[in-house]
Image: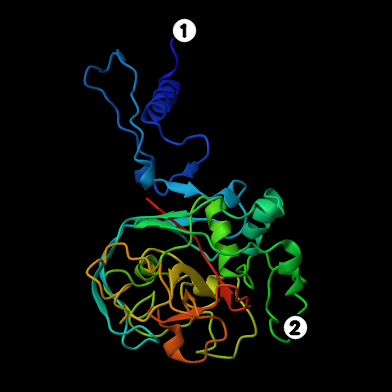
Amino acid sequence: MRPSPRRARVLIAGAALAACGCDVETRTYRVVSDASADVTRDAADGGSDGGSDDVATPRDVSQVEPTPTSCATRVVGCGMVPVPGGAFAMGDTGAANAAPVLPSVTVGPFWIDRYEVTVARFQVFLESVPAGSRAPSGPVAYPRGALPFEGSVDAEAELASFVGETTRNPGCNYGATPPREGHPMNCLDWATAQAFCVWDGGRLPTEAEWEFAARGADGRAYPWGATAGQACTSVVGARRTGTCAVDDEAFARIASPFSALQLVGNVWEWTADWFAPFTDPVCWQSSARAEPLCASHADPAYRVIRGGAWDATEDQYARAGTRFGRVPSHRDSRHGFRCARSR
């Protein structure tokens, strides 16, 4: 018995994926839009008599939203957005530590989390991987090359120990009462954030990727445009005492050009790079500004954090170009992260 047209399409699409050598066992995807879901019909010799089956041509998986490991069973904070890549001027003379402006920086296409990684997603990581096996087994791949994994991954006991530190870290979300599953996972160091992202199927974004996702090619001062607006900071209105839910409807209309949310405010976000001023001759003043990644550092060494936090009271710290460095082992209720992956 001949399979139905729909089943034939599925079988042929599956065979095509197998033939191309795509990693279909370890990755799952969902469609970004109806356009991404389309299949093309090969009806060259078909007609109204139904003489030929429909033939499906799989869409390029770079156009289909990947499902992070932490979202195999959907929890709060899931979703990635595509960023097409392109050229832009990196830096902002009105922001902190972001001058001089670097012209003609380019990044390739990538995906980035729509939201900051939530407590709910991070809990899946802790429950799925034994404590001694959470660090990546080797260097982490980036478009310009591999970045060594450095540091150790926090265990549950270390993360939970910060919950009781009400003086220094009153807003740590892991283990909080009442639960804060929809808030960003904060109070964790750089290595633990990178380990999560690798397990999740990606990596921390480079600093250039993060800025392009936040500002786009037009170099806007804020993810939502050219003028200051309401975000999860203390710049406008009453001073906040902790983080906001990542999907808080109050901030749904101030997305980045690519629909990522809360790239400014809520928590500072770890990125892959070591911190260096934009005058640094090795990382930023060389001619190689395609897919930049600052892999060298001075002493003491700091990793780049971007995006500002809930306690920011000055507009300078709420601009998308602002950048600071933190010791990689630093843990703070104002620090979180989101993941990215190349397309």
Query: x%, y% of residue 200?
Result: 55, 52
Residue annotated with mark 1: 1
The residues tagged by marks 2 and 1 sit, at their Cα atoms, a distance apart of 69 Å
Q: Is residue 342 above or below residue 52?
A: below
The residue lying at 31 percent from left, 73 percent from top is 282
The residue lying at 68 percent from left, 71 percent from top is 173
Query: x%, y% of residue 111?
Result: 41, 56
Which numbered disc covers residue 212? none
Between disc 2 and disc 1, whose residue precedes?
1
Which numbered disc covers residue 166? 2
Q: Nearer the viewer, residue 41 or 340?
A: 340
The quarter holding residue 48 reads top left
Give amino acid for label 2.
Thr
Find out whether the residues at labels 2 and 1 contact each other: C-beta distance under 8 Å.
no
Q: Secondary structure at mark 1?
A: loop
What color scheme is it? rainbow
Q: Secondary structure at mark 2?
A: loop
The quarter holding residue 287 reads bottom left
Image-based side of 320 in relation to 171, left or right: left
**Comparing labels 2 and 1, the label whose residue is closer to the camera:** 2
Q: Is residue 307 above or below residue 56?
A: below
Query: x%, y% of residue 318?
Result: 45, 84
Give amino acid for label 1.
Met
